[in-house]
Amino acid sequence: MKKFRVGIIGTGFGARVHAPMFKNHEGFESVAIASVSRGNIEEARETSGIENVYTDWRLMLEKEELDLIVVASAVDFHREMTEAAYQKGVHVLCEKPMAFDTAEVEEMVKAKEKSGNMGLINHEFRFLPARLKVKEILDSGKLGNILHVRYLCSFASLTSLTSRTRGWLGRAEKGGGMLGAIGSHMTDSLQWWMGSEYREVFANLPIHVPVQTDTEGNTEHRTADDGFQVVGTLGNGTTVTMELISAARKTANDWRLEIFGTNGTLLMLDDKEVFLSEGDGPLEKVELLKDLNAPADMPAVAARYYNGFHRMLDALYDSLERGQKHPSLADFETGKNTQQVLDAIRLSSKEGRKISLG
């Protein structure tokens, strides 16, 4: 079996999650990892399990013979790193959100088209069995014409918000915020499930915990959202509400998706259970693909992602091997659509008005 040589940029999520995921897939070999700002080589080596650690990502691109670059840095570096990877002549798997704004995304798309290499976005949640089942049911037409989608996410993270720093994730100028971190996943899945893009949005981006002070008196001022509320309409006429709250002490479900059609209703809970009602019948649990169990030696933080991430890597390997994108993978074109929605949501919140897209 051919192995694709992978270089990872980013020793945060890249080291903790990407590195062990690629290590545990027989089709890939993680040959190097580069830090952006951390600079602790031994820590990066221990966390990632990759011996070959660089403190300069450009040097890694120059020195290593790679097939794929994973861009897992802070958002405001994505464009620069992606363009450099394409100049090197390799494929790119970019973390979400794709870039700081649509203007940057357009430059990334141009670089991809010029290089002739693949550009993919790591929306691994698409590959969770529950989300795959939602896509299957919607594509089957069982629900009829979809009238409304309600998509909710809630995290019991108030204690964390008040006791820990958020770093770049709390800074809008660095591309932080829960809209980018989680809203990008939700927007991508919604548009993928429905086969239709947002036509208009009206939104609010609150900062429920704008200031955090530690026990030593150090203060962090946040400029990026820690929640969002979006009301929108898709191009096919379906209305949508999409909401996230992270400043909660207790929640019943982390994720809740409800899809209301003329012929039935679908409910998904916590990305683990799917229920279907046809006509006026009861909501009945739908059988899903069996979960994949993470290897026993995989770190816990990575193991949480294994069920969807490993399936995504299967699709990625298939795409690189055949030279044709797997239909369930998110690419730079869908990434651009998602980024346009995120930009419109931010503009709507800033100006307090409905924003039309396209």
Image (cartoon, helix red, strand yellow):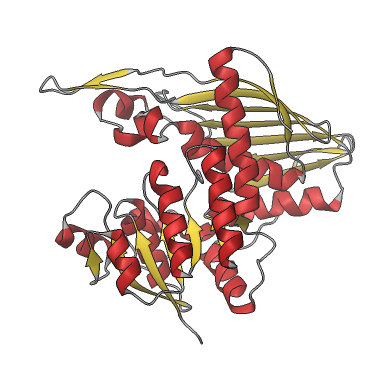
Q: Is residue 26 above or below residue 316?
A: below
Which residue sits furthest top?
A: 352
Using the image, determine if residue 273 lies above or below residue 56. above
Residue 329, position in %: x, y?
A: 62, 59
Q: Which residue corresponds to the image point at 35% horizontal and 53% vertical from the top-left?
A: 301
| Quarter of the view holding residue 10 | bottom left
Give me the residue at 42% from left, 23% from top.
248
The percent position of residue 25, horizontal first and vertical second, equals: 45, 73
Answer whether residue 269 is visible to the viewer in this image.
no
Nearest to the observer: residue 285 or residue 332: 332
**Eyeballing the image, is 292 above or below 279?**
below
* Residue in the picture at 73% in, 51% down: 135
- Image point 20% across, 63% down: which residue? 46
Residue 112 horizontal/vertical position (percent) = 57, 60
The x, y position of residue 31, in whole percent, is 33, 74
Towards the viewer: 272 or 351: 351
